[in-house]
Image (cartoon, coloured by chain):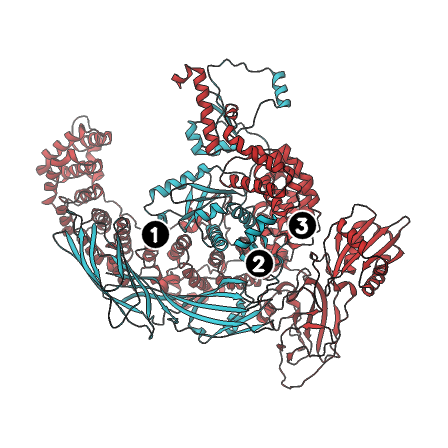
Chain colours: A red, B cyan
């Protein structure tokens, strides 16, 4: 610095060159120092051509440029100066280009806030796009732009998206909540409102994301969960796996605040306490009368039951989260069902093993019995990574008991010989722990360790010495020969820790080895100057102790050592020497303390406790990051203790829910004999009947013998080929279902059908019809299938024969019945909604003039004159998509017939004094006129 | 170093501007560029929170004290689960970074690189590292580190599982997961990462869904794309995202409808020096390759499902059907997937297909030793054992080996001390043998312990547990599919202690 400051110009040059290099190689986004800019030339040129490419009219060049820019971003290089050129392309029609621009925007908007604002209007427009994918991605990007000015816009967009018809858009809005919250926590209250709304959502797609948002924004608002608790439990199996993890961890916390403890306070189920078995019967009965018998809240049981299948998940995070749920919530005797699954995870990747083993280590301290049968799964292989080895060792040590200790020790003997010396040393410590924990094997272990003292490897010997020292300290009485043996070893051992330990042992028990101790001191006096500090300190200690017990033989030696220590280079040793001298050698200056020297130095010392490093990890919730790193991670939420008295249970009661409407039922997932009442919340799971009985919310089952059960299934009607128009999701799904077969005519079998307006699973040109069958009779109905009576030209993709429709009482009388039924679709249900631009609409309309057009003038009611209700009415009538319109008074809708793909165009033009003209263009003129009639009726209605 | 400070020359004459001038500057923004950190006086910096949080950067600048002068409500609460992802190659270079929110400086990786330096083997790098402001969770896979940066509490397995999914997805898309492949397809990888995670929370991880959004590269398509300028990005929302069957794409069509199932079993075992089984178990997996049109609903049943002790399923399998009837009922994803993994009840004795006769001696003098290995078939159920490969991790002091193999060939890597003997097919009439002498480092003590052997092998057309597929039925579609089942037994972690 000094030399440079003498020459100003050279300093500047230097600095400039530095930053140029910096930019050229690593280019952090922020290093646009003034000096560096001029020397930017090489990189500048490269970026310049990118700019040209972006401003070119050719899409392919733009795309190429964006790809290179994204490549720069991926490498962590700076591309921020291209912002103005890039942002222009945000409205591009090319989807890939657009996506890449989005990537760029999200990365740099925070730095270039003013310019970023230019793009906002594009997103606002896209938020209204009929294509749900475009709406969702617009919201995703909009909410990722971290520019405070647009917070109100984001808030508005989130609120709208939360009531979007597409569950995918709603899911995106749940994600956006967290993004907005992190940008501006002041919005919390508004965001909670949105969360509350989304929590009520019945789509499995939304559930995981909204619970995630809940956990981030307002984990303390547990009251929001009450009403949704049962729904979440029931949806759980069908939520995507990542959502499952989040929901399970939230429900764990919820349950700990809402239910009472299933663990009996007296530890009857605690296998570690054997009190219960030896208790006198008298005492026990008294206990039982005192403690109110525990009954589990049915909701608590519901959670445990519905999470259990997830133990079979392929996602290790899901399995772990169920395991922790059982650990924290289940009655003690049920926890062990997670064992097998956890052991299975040990076959997974090394990182997974690491986390799972850590959790097992914590669990195995409290509950040996859980993992003991799987002890062999924790045997160490030579190919395991170091941290895996030490965790396995830890667990094996935790599992050791009187019965299996011999097996474990035999296994340990192999480990001690391992080439990995660190691991061998760990094994020796583990042997030490086993020896203290299980008194039967203490002697065996000690002998084994003494044998190891003649091992060739220093680390092994050193570790053995240290462990033996600890063991002897626990029971020094009869082990003087081991001490003698170790004194002999002192000549050969070079590891300082081991030497120090031996010296300490001899000093501590010098009265047991009165002959050897002074001799050891003599040897140490000779080598004192060349020893390590830690050995020197222990030599001083040994000298002091011998001086007190055997001053006749050792006085001179002690003096000599203390003199050496006095001039040692290390101040610790000098200090210690000075202190010891004052303490043991009485002189006029030494105060009252020297009287107590013997009691100070030779006081009985408590034996060190050898225990698991995982002993107190159970203060953290299992499976969390905090548990893994053994410190509280930021954002960690404590698991509360069970409440003494359960809070009001009725808060979770909900009215019977309306069936879900957005989803096409799939034939595949429909299990047989599914109760009708549960189809709303259990449609996706394969839940059988037995679950239904225990569900709290009153089902009408088994009251008077005429219990009902039904099956949901879908069949598809079809006629030949489709047209190439982009089909979008339905804008509206009618809730109305129609009677297909009345229970009286059907002799107990009732059938209802409903148009789901979903693209058919089997063939795109089919229309899905959902049929619900209900058995209202008191006997079993078997072999329900659709006969081959279909009219010509109509293809039916039927469901398979339903084995039996179940009911509770069984009367076996076999009879065959056939019913002729017909499905009469409203004409509007035979269309598929289509998205197109206004331009395309006009173009199509131009083709469909004359014969293909029909129109009518009607008087619309006042409420139908605004666009929202009008759109809804039309959508309710027919499955058509809204076409964005440039005029306020003209509303356009487009659809196509499912069977032939013929385009259908609907125009509603509002005129003065509540008059309106409906125009329908389609080549299927019959359908057109039928639809016109329906629409007229619908729009004129109040 | 993350934020280059703007230097001010202490010797330059500088006058602090007056209030009016400052205001002027403020409004016109003349020449002032925003940087995270400025050196305003020798050794005095003004910086933002970002700078203050990056400890390595501060140390580099020589900062010893920080005075906080921040005020306001723009509090940056980081809530996302996964903040950033870095891909690091074996030599410690970061070759790809992706941030899902604000940018985290690369310098956080220094903590990781330090740990990697310390570890003898990449496998030994701890998967979770705690730094002052971040937590680093990493996986090591295909010779690459996937390193994610976390700021708040999150289940570590959640992150680990996700990182493995990323690796699998790259493997699935490009055929392999390597630095070259990722660098060649960096834009597509970036787009994939964008779709897989939103705000740090996994969005689309199902291969069938992703492939509809971003089409995997094929030679034909890349040619077409360059000619027409069309793209790999789908413009429609994959139906899977919305249906109840998120793992399967709609509108699948094949001319040949086929469904193949591979039952692959691995024997994990530890044998002690006498050949006694210390520990043995069988782990199996059913890999499926299903190419069926439409929406087939399959049911797969086993002859002896009682053998299966513990199972885990692909999400498509209906758990309740398995519980009640012990059959696998599912609507399969399109293409390759793992249908189930299972564990065979440990009470059943595991058949060990090979035995090893071994002796290894080191001479007392300490200059050499002898090795003698013979491998032979044991319980093979009449099938041939193929692909036998014996790996021995020799003690550190073994310098070289001079051996003679009656069958196959052997190699010895002096750097890693690994002896590999590739035997191939096992002939029961003529057992392969490997014998010869070992030479040790002169003066080194006789190795205390004996190495252990790892054995690799393969038996075609045999599931060692005896598991048999009974039948496969298809519902929901009219055509007749071609069905096939294949059995393979392999050695998993098969170790013999010498």
Q: Which residue is mark 1?
A: A385
Give the Cα separation between the discs numbered 1 and 3: 47 Å
Considering depth in this image, is A110 or A10 the residue closer to the camera?
Answer: A10
Considering depth in this image, is A672 or B425 the residue closer to the camera?
Answer: B425
Mark 1 or mark 2, earlier in chain: 2
Considering depth in this image, is A869 or A499 the residue closer to the camera?
Answer: A869
Give the Cα separation between the discs numbered 3 and 2: 19 Å
Report x, y in % for residue B82: 51, 46
Q: Is residue B485 left or right of residue B393?
A: right
Mark 3 or mark 2, earlier in chain: 3
The image quadrant of residue B71 is top right
Which disc, if any, is residue A871? none
Mark 2 element type: loop
Residue sitting at 60 percent across and 41 percent down?
A61
Answer few, some or many: residues within 10 Å of disc 3's Cα (few below 14, many 20 plus, some between 14 and 19): many
Which disc, if any, is residue A239? 2
Q: Which residue is mark 3?
A: A162
Pointer 1 and pointer 2: residues touching (CB < 8 Å)?
no
Q: Is residue B14 left or right of residue A755?
A: left
Q: Is residue A814 visible?
A: yes
Q: Is residue A522 left or right of residue A65?
A: left
Circle 3 marks a residue in which chain? Answer: A
The image quadrant of residue A930 is bottom right
């Amino acid at each position: 610095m000094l030399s440079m400051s003498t020459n100003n110009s050279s300093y500047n040059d230097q600095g400039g060159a530095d930053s140029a290099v910096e930019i050229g190689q690593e280019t952090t986004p922020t290093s646009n120092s003034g000096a560096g800019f001029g020397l930017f030339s090489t990189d500048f040129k490269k970026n310049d051509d990118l700019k040209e490419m972006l401003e070119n009219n050719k899409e392919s060049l733009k795309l190429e440029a964006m790809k290179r820019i994204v490549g720069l971003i991926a490498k962590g290089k700076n591309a921020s100066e291209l912002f103005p050129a890039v942002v222009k392309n945000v409205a591009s029609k090319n989807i890939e280009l657009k996506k890449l621009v989005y990537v760029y925007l999200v990365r740099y908007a925070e730095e270039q806030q003013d310019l970023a604002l230019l793009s906002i209007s594009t997103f606002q427009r896209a938020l209204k796009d009929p294509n749900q994918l475009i709406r969702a991605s617009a919201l995703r990007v909009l909410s990722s732009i971290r520019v405070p000015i647009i917070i109100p816009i984001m808030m508005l967009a989130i609120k709208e998206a939360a009531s979007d018809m597409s569950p995918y858009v709603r899911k995106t809005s749940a994600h956006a909540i967290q993004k907005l919250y992190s940008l501006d926590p002041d919005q919390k209250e508004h965001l909670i409102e949105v969360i509350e709304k989304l929590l009520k959502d019945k789509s499995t797609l939304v559930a995981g994301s909204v619970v995630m948002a809940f956990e981030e924004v307002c984990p303390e608002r547990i009251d929001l969960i009450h009403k949704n608790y049962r729904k979440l439990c029931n949806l759980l199996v069908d939520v995507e796996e990542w959502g499952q993890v989040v929901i399970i961890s939230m429900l764990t916390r919820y349950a700990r605040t809402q239910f009472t403890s299933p663990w009996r306070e007296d530890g009857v189920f605690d296998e570690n306490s054997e009190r219960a078995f030896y208790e006198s019967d008298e005492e026990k009965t008294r206990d039982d009368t005192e403690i109110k018998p525990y009954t589990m809240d049915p909701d608590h049981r519901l959670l445990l039951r519905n999470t259990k299948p997830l133990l079979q998940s392929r996602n290790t995070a899901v399995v772990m989260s169920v395991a922790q749920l059982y650990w924290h919530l289940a009655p003690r005797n049920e926890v062990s069902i997670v064992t097998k699954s956890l052991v299975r995870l040990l076959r997974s990747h090394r990182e997974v093993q690491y986390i799972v083993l850590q959790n097992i280590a914590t669990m195995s301290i409290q509950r040996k019995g859980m993992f003991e049968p799987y002890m062999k799964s924790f045997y160490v292989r030579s190919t395991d990574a170091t941290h895996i080895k030490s965790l396995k060792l830890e667990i094996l040590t935790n599992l050791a008991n009187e019965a299996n200790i011999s097996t474990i020790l035999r296994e340990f003997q192999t480990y001690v010989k391992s080439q990995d010396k660190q691991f061998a040393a760990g094994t020796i410590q583990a042997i030490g722990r086993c020896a203290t924990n299980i008194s039967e094997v203490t002697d065996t272990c000690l002998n084994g360790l003494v044998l190891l003292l003649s091992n060739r490897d220093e680390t092994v010997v050193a570790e053995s010495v240290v462990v033996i020292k600890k063991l002897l300290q626990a029971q020094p009485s009869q082990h003087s020969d081991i001490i003698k043996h170790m004194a002999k070893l002192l000549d050969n051992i070079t590891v300082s820790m081991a030497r120090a330990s031996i010296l300490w042992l001899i000093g501590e028990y010098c009265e047991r080895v009165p002959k050897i101790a002074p001799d050891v001191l003599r040897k140490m006096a000779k080598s004192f100057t060349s020893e390590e500090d830690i050995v020197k300190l222990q030599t001083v200690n040994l000298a002091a102790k011998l001086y007190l017990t055997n001053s006749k033989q050792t006085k001179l030696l002690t003096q000599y050592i203390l003199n050496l220590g006095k001039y040692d280079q290390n101040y610790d040793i000098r200090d210690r020497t000075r202190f010891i001298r004052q303490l043991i050698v009485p002189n006029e200056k030494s105060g009252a303390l020297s009287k107590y020297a013997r009691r100070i130095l030779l006081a009985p010392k408590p034996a060190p406790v050898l225990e698991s490093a995982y002993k107190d990890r159970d203060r953290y919730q299992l499976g969390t990051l905090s548990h893994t790193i053994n410190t509280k991670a930021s954002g960690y939420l404590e698991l509360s203790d069970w409440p003494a008295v359960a809070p009001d249970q009725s808060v979770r009661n909900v009215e019977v829910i309306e069936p879900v409407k957005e989803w096409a039922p799939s034939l595949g997932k429909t299990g047989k004999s599914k109760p009708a009442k549960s189809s709303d919340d259990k449609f996706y799971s394969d839940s059988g009947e037995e679950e239904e009985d225990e569900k709290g919310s009153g089902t009408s089952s088994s009251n008077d013998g005429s219990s009902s059960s039904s099956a949901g299934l879908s069949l598809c009607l079809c006629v030949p080929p489709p047209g190439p128009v982009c089909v979008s999701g339905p804008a509206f799904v009618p809730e109305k279902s129609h009677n297909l077969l009345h229970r009286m005519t059907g002799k107990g079998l009732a059938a209802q059908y409903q148009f789901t307006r979903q693209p058919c699973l089997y063939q795109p040109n089919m229309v899905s019809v959902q049929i619900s069958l209900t058995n209202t009779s008191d006997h079993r109905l078997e072999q329900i299938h659709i006969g081959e009576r279909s009219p010509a030209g109509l293809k039916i993709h039927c469901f398979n024969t339903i084995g039996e429709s179940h009911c509770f009482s069984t009367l076996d009388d076999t009879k065959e019945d056939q019913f002729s039924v017909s499905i009469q679709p409203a004409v509007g249900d035979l269309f598929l909604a289509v998205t197109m631009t206004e331009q395309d609409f006009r173009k199509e309309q131009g083709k469909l003039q004359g014969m293909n057009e029909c129109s009518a003038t009607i008087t619309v009611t006042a409420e139908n004159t605004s666009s929202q209700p009008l759109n809804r009415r039309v959508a309710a009538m027919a499955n058509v998509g809204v076409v964005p319109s440039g005029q306020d008074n003209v509303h356009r809708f487009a659809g196509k017939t499912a069977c032939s793909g013929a385009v259908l165009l609907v125009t509603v033009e509002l005129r003065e004094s509540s008059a309106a003209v409906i125009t329908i263009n389609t080549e299927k003129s019959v359908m057109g006129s039928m639809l016109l009639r329906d629409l007229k009726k619908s729009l004129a209605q109040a | 170093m993350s934020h280059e400070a703007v230097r001010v020359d202490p010797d330059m004459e500088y006058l602090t501007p007056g209030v009016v001038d400052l205001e002027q500057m403020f409004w016109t923004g003349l020449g002032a560029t925003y940087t995270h950190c400025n050196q305003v006086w020798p050794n005095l910096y003004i910086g933002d929170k970002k700078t203050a949080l990056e400890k390595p950067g501060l140390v580099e600048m020589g900062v010893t004290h920080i005075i906080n002068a921040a005020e306001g409500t723009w509090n940056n609460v980081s809530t996302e689960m996964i903040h950033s992802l870095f891909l690091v190659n074996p030599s410690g270079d970061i070759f790809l970074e992706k941030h899902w929110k604000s940018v985290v400086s690369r310098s956080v990786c220094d903590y990781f690189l330090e740990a990697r330096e310390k570890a003898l083997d990449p496998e030994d790098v701890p998967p979770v590292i705690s730094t002052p402001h971040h937590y680093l969770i990493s996986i090591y896979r295909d010779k690459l580190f996937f390193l994610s940066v976390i700021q708040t509490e999150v289940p570590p397995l959640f992150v680990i599982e996700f990182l493995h999914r990323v690796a699998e997805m790259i493997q699935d898309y490009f055929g392999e997961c390597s630095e070259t492949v990722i660098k060649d397809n960096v834009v597509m990888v970036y787009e994939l990462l964008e779709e897989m995670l939103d705000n740090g929370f996994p969005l689309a991880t199902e291969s069938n869904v992703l492939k509809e959004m971003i089409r995997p590269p094929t030679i034909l398509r890349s040619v077409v794309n360059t000619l027409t300028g069309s793209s790999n990005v789908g413009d429609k929302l994959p139906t899977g995202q919305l249906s109840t069957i998120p793992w399967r794409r709609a509108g699948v069509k094949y001319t040949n409808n086929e469904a193949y199932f591979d039952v692959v079993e691995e024997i994990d075992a530890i044998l002690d020096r006498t050949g006694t089984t210390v520990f043995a178990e069988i782990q199996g997996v059913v890999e499926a390759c299903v190419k069926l049109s439409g929406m087939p609903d399959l049911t797969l049943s086993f002859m002896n499902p009682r053998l299966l002790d513990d199972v885990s399923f692909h999400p498509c399998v209906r758990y309740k059907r398995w519980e009640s009837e012990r059959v696998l009922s599912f609507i399969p994803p399109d293409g390759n997937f793992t249908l189930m993994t299972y564990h065979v009840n440990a009470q059943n004795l595991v058949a060990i297909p090979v035995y090893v006769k071994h002796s290894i001696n080191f001479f007392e003098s300490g200059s050499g030793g002898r090795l003698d290995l013979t491998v032979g078939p044991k319980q093979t159920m009449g099938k041939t054992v193929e692909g036998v490969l014996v790996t021995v991790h020799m003690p550190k002091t073994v310098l070289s080996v001079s051996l003679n193999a009656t069958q196959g060939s052997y190699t010895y890597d002096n750097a890693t001390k690994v002896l590999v003997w590739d035997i191939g097919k096992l002939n029961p009439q003529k057992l392969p043998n490997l014998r010869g002498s070992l030479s040790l480092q002169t003066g080194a003590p006789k190795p205390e312990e004996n190495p252990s052997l790892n054995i690799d092998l393969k038996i075609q057309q045999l599931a060692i547990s005896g598991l048999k597929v009974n039948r496969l039925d298809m519902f929901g579609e009219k055509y007749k599919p071609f069905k096939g089942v294949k059995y393979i037994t392999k050695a998993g972690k098969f170790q013999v202690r010498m």
